[in-house]
Amino acid sequence: MEAFLARKKRRLTPEPEPVHDNNDDEPTEVKLAMLSSLHPALEQETLLDVLLAHDGSVSAASASLTSTTSPAKKQRPSGAMCAQTSLKHFAVASPNSSVVAARSPKKARLMSKKGSTLHLYSPEDIAEHTPCTIIHNFLPADLADALLLELLEESKTFEKITFKLFDTVVSSPHTSGFFVGTAAEQDSQRHEYLYNGARLTDVRTLTPMLDAVKARVRDAVNEEIQTRIRTRYPGGKKLKHQSPRPWSPNAAFVNCYAGPQQSVGWHSDQLTYLGPRAVIGSLSLGVAREFRVRRVVCPKDDGDAGADADLGGQIAIHLPHNSLLIMHAEMQEEWKHSVAPAQVIDPHPLAGSKRINITYRDYRPEFHPRFTPRCKCGVPGVLRVVQKKRENWGRYFWMCHASNVPGKEGCNFFLWAEFDEDGSPVWERMKSAVRSGNGNDG
Ligand SMILES: O=C(O)CCC(=O)C(=O)O
Ligand SMILES: [Fe+2]
């Protein structure tokens, strides 16, 4: 919820097409990429149809295309009628992810093309092509409806979040409320934690229903994490810096989107209090909206920081009422997400045009601001990851957050973050970096 502004458009540099050998064992999307490299003027949909018509033989498909009289003309398939024409339309290789499909290492990653949106509905497609998994009809229907009604009532007193962006104070295009488990946590959140460099004044305690649902979300998320590790991560092992401990949510941000125009801009969630490789459980209630995800692409050279960050298109995950989306450990560092304004919505019988979203989060005790590095402004720093420069790509660092406080200037504090294999901070190594002068090179 901390970042909701659309980023500036940057120059895009096309990525070279992957080169593959002709091999009958290749999955369809790889064959499609081969065919595409042989017939670059033809649409992927057309190529797919021809490929299927030739039983997956690239050479036969290619020969038939070569003999076609007007190859550049798009040939629409007859009877291709569905909401999602084909996932194969989006096949490109993606070189810079820490995660590969464990079961099918040769499989090309599907990614939406620049400027296009790939719409995903089924849990299988979402698990395969995004860093998320989804569980539809997560709660018993009555409980989901009751929780929705309770939060619609709560949301009447939610506020837009405001923060300072450069010299302008901006406010989020939706409202939010923050809930924690106990009165002690409420007090600590009000007086010790910072969000966008500012204190939260409105911190509430979890309602009994939010608390009961938290336990269900916790169990489901832990199961999904294990499945993800087993089936998709290299060697069936958790990611480096991912916590091996069970995910244990102790806070919930609740967002209310009061109509189709309310939204949240492209962002990654702040890792400052969650630590690296954080997992988030996100429950949607009310009107169905599109949750968009986009991979952060490593720029080709540092001379043009972030130049390729917009390369590739976006994937829209449809979030109906009562669906639980799990953002897995690879999400925040390597992907960005947003909820775009909607052109049209289907009104929900209880919520009208409103959508409620609950993100359950696990605030790790070792990332309490009492322990994290403080800058010259005297406030705890913010934890970020290098996403815009090829050099040090994916490395974590602490920096000053005070520049986001309205009316306050920040300092140039910068410190590389050091974590052990399980993502716990290694403060000693960070302190020695400061002593040796390596902590302030940002
Ligand atoms: O509304 C959603 O589904 C996502 C909200 C979100 O990204 C956030 O609160 O950080
Ligand atoms: Fe988010």
Image: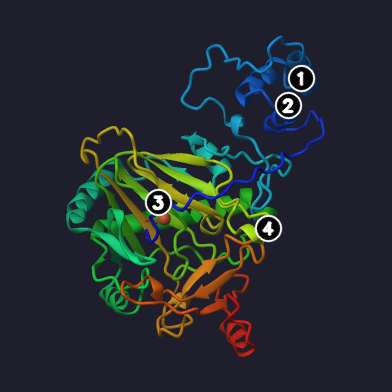
Give the amino acid type for the residue marked by disc 3 in the picture: Gly
Looking at the image, residue 38 sits to the left or right of residue 238; the answer is: right
Q: Say which quadrant the N terminus sits in.
A: bottom left
**On screen, 33 above or below 109?**
above
Q: Is mark 3 on a helix, strand or loop?
A: strand
The CA span between labels 4 and 3 is 26 Å
Looking at the image, residue 366 sits to the left or right of residue 159; the answer is: right
Q: Which of marks 1 and 3 is nearer the N terminus?
A: 1
Q: Which of marks 4 and 2 is nearer the N terminus?
A: 2
Which numbered disc, 1 or 4, marks the residue closer to the eye? Answer: 4
The CA span between labels 2 and 1 is 7 Å
Q: What element carries label 1?
A: helix
Looking at the image, residue 39 sits to the left or right of residue 418; the answer is: right
Q: Is mark 4 on a helix, strand or loop?
A: loop
Give the amino acid type for the residue marked by disc 2 in the picture: Leu
Q: Residue 62 carries which label?
A: 1
**On screen, 356 above or below 431?**
above
Residue depicted at 54% across the width and 43% down the height = 127
Q: Say which quadrant the C terminus sits in.
A: bottom right
Instruction: Kindly identify which residue carries mark 2.
Output: 35
The CA span between labels 1 and 4 is 36 Å
Instruction: Kindly identify which residue carries mark 3.
Output: 265
How many other residues sit within 10 Å of disc 4, few (<14), some (14-19) or many (≥20)? some
